[in-house]
């Protein structure tokens, strides 16, 4: 199983590479990798397993964070309400691509962090408020989905990773809390 030991940290050159597209049809290896990435996220959100294996809870993971320079990302966003167990978004995206996006921008009110960054980096990470993403799923099916709010932020953070971009690249050095006046702040 994937643990924090498998996640490379800032300074490792792979985090700054533009990752390669995966070949279709998906190889057994790439399918297995996707499954393991998704399993890591689920484990990291399970209090017992996270404690047992010292996992930092995560909602997304990109293959470059495992020192694998491939365009594969996993997303596991739990439902915001307690009762229903259905996650908001639970998928592995192969060759994800933002094909269009809103002019409107958004940012997480709390700023962002990263499992590959072992330090807090305060400031607003300004992103597109809404995006349309195409990708192939683990069964090789093609998808085109529209995302907004928290889901859009998470997917953009992961797609940044496969392009060698870190969240703090978006933070205004001089004025970390700068934000356009029409930005949407997401809790
Ligand atoms: O590239 C992928 N990463 O670096 C993992 C990141 C991805 C998110 C950061 C901002 C948008 C996407 C991640 O998940 N985190 N960042 C560091 C520590 C916290 C953790 C997190 O937000 N956890 C969480 C949130 C809600 C519910 C459960 N867990
Ligand atoms: Ni990250």
Image: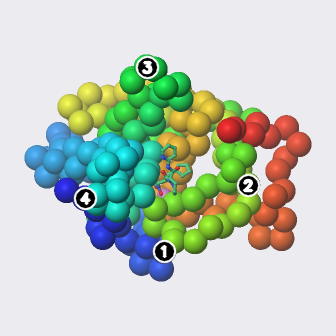
Residue identified by numbered label 3? 84
Could you give the CA–CA distance between mark 3 and mark 2, rounded to whole angstroms?
31 Å
Q: Are marks 1 and 4 in contact (CB under 8 Å)?
A: no
- Residue 124 numbered tag: 2
Q: Are marks 3 and 4 in contact (CB under 8 Å)?
A: no
Q: CA distance from mark 1 to mark 4?
A: 18 Å
The x, y position of residue 86, in whole percent, is 39, 23
- Crowding around mark 2 (Cα neighbors within 10 Å: few <14, some 14 to 19, many 20+) is many
Frontmost of labels 2 and 4 is: 4
The image quarter in which residue 104 lies: top right
N-terminal of the pair, mark 2 or mark 4, is: 4
Residue 84 location, quadrant: top left
Categorize mark 3 by other alpha carbons within 10 Å: few (<14), some (14-19), many (20+).
few
Question: Which residue position is annotated with label 1?
Answer: 10
Spatial CA span between label 2 and label 4: 30 Å
- 130 with respect to 165 (left or right): right
Q: Is any atom of residue 169 visible in this view?
A: no
Q: Secondary structure at mark 3?
A: loop
């Amino acid at each position: 199983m994937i643990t924090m030991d498998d996640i490379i940290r800032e300074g490792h050159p792979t985090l700054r590479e533009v990752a390669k597209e995966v070949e279709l049809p998906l190889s057994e290896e790439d399918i297995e990798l996707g499954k393991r990435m998704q399993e890591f996220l689920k484990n990291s959100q399970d209090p017992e397993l996270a404690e047992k294996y010292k996992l930092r809870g995560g909602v997304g993971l990109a293959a470059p964070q495992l020192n694998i320079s491939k365009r594969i990302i996993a997303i596991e966003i739990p439902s915001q309400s307690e009762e229903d167990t259905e996650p908001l978004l639970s998928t592995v995206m192969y060759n994800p691509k933002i094909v269009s996006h809103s002019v409107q921008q958004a940012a997480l009110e709390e700023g962002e962090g990263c499992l590959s960054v072992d330090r807090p980096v305060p400031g607003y990470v300004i992103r597109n408020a809404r995006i349309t993403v195409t990708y192939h799923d683990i069964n090789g099916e093609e998808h085109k989905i529209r995302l907004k709010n928290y889901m859009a932020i998470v997917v953009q953070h992961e797609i940044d990773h496969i392009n060698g971009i870190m969240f703090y690249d978006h933070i205004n050095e001089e004025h970390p809390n700068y934000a356009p006046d029409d930005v949407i702040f997401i809790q």
